[in-house]
Amino acid sequence: MTAARVEAAAEVLVGVVHTTPLEHSPRLSQAIGAEVLLKRENRQVARSYKVRGAFHGIQGLSEAERARGVVCASAGNYAQGVAWACARLGIQGRIYVPSNTPRQKRQRILALGGPSVKLVVTGSNYDEASMAAREDAESSGAVFVHPFDDPATILGQGSVAVEAMAQAAERGLRVTTVVLPVGGGGLASGMSVWLKERHPAVRIIGVEPAGAASMTAALAAGRPVKLPHVDTFVDGAAVGRVGDLTYDVVSELVDEVVAVPEGAVCTEMLELYQVDGIITEPAGALASTYALQLAGTLSADEAVICIVSGGNNDVSRYAEIVERSLLHEGLRHYFMVTFPQEPGALRYFLEEVLSEGEDIVLFEYVKKNNRETGPALVGVELDRADRITGLLERMEKSPMQIEQVPPGSPLFSFFL
């Protein structure tokens, strides 16, 4: 793969996909101390950059391959790109998605593909759906189109870099850093192939979710490895094993791969929405989540490009997004409280344990057969994270048995 081949793919996509905006972010620029530009692939066809790789790969099939139809597996965004490409090119496709794929993405797949596609929901994560799709391709003879570990897909995704750097050059900006999300590694591979040949001084940083840090694991092992557990919250980047091809490219060309907590991603999603007016899915906020850590490392005349990779977020997920953000920011805490078997115990908790700026957001008795005296799961929200010290001190002095529920405890299933 070469920069010239990425440029050829970009030419194929002219007039097919959108030229998405490269927007200045006042919030991030002020926080970092350098010019921050958001490449708005959430405004792409199907609201994700993955349509670039999907269309480029499928349009390159021979007539015989097109007649056999295509099969793919995806967490949702690549599937939408495949569905759109199938409908546009008149090709039949079967699309496998895992059960954690948001309903909004499933509905969009069917809407974009229409009668050209069939949707199959199977498995609990991308890797299980991918296995089912491969079995389908082997038994039916359909062409399996890979969402990231395929040269044609990678070259199409690389067109994001060609477009973004041209837009920055038109404005006379000196781009020194590009921050992009990493799932299976297709976008990182395609962009780095082009950037390292055309702009070798640009630093490339790949960002993946801490709960699905498959590229970090691969780099540590010196080869792609399967994660023992994958947190599927950042569904667009929740890949248990990166590709062989993408690993080779990323390990050679990407300067740094980092992982960020899912809670931090949620906080950035809310900032993008409430301050910048940008709707993203979790994977779409990965790059700008990490970009905040560049504060103080860049000069004012440098520019940073962050790829906002997708905007397919189900509105029903926002309650969980807010919850995860508050937990990450230290503004919400949960406790198991066993009240003494005496009158006024709850009033004591409200008046003597809790203080100003500390509010109960959840109160659930655990033992249903003794509601007056049984232990309760209590959620407390703080207006400042540093209030937790005083709250814990008052809890320690109280006559009640109080145990803080740590993040990751099975009890979190009550409220996440």
Image: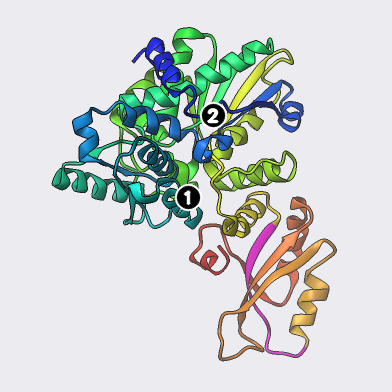
Give the camera-side residue of 109 and 49.
109
Is the residue 346 above or below the residue 91 in the image? below
Residue 45 is left or right of residue 229, and the answer is right
Image quadrant for the N terminus?
Answer: top left
Residue pointed to by mark 2: 18
Residue depicted at 36% across the width and 21% down the height? 249
Residue 309 is left or right of residue 267, and the answer is left
Whichever of labels 1 and 2 marks the residue nearer the N terminus, that label is: 2
Q: Which span of residues is magenta-colored? A: 332-343
Colouring method of the image: rainbow
Say what amino acid the circle numbered 1 marks: Arg
Image quadrant for the C terminus?
Answer: bottom right
Where residue 112 appears, as percent x and y from the top left, is 44, 46
Is the residue 6 above or below the residue 321 in the image? above
Quadrant assignment, res 334: bottom right
Tag 2, which secondary structure? Answer: loop
Q: Is there a contact, CB below 8 Å, between mark 1 and mark 2?
A: no
Q: Mark 1: few, some, or many residues within 10 Å (few <14, many ≥20)?
A: some
Where residue 223 appears, as percent x and y from the top left, is 30, 29
Residue 15 is left or right of residue 53, and the answer is right
Say what amino acid the circle numbered 2 marks: His
Instruction: Measure the alpha-carbon separation of dots 1 and 2.
Output: 18 Å
Where residue 85 appears, as percent x and y from the top left, is 39, 37
Residue pointed to by mark 1: 108
Q: Mark 2: few, some, or many residues within 10 Å (few <14, many ≥20)?
A: some
Q: Can residue 228 be spotted in the picture?
A: no
Quadrant assignment, res 365: bottom right
Membership of 65 in magenta stretch:
no
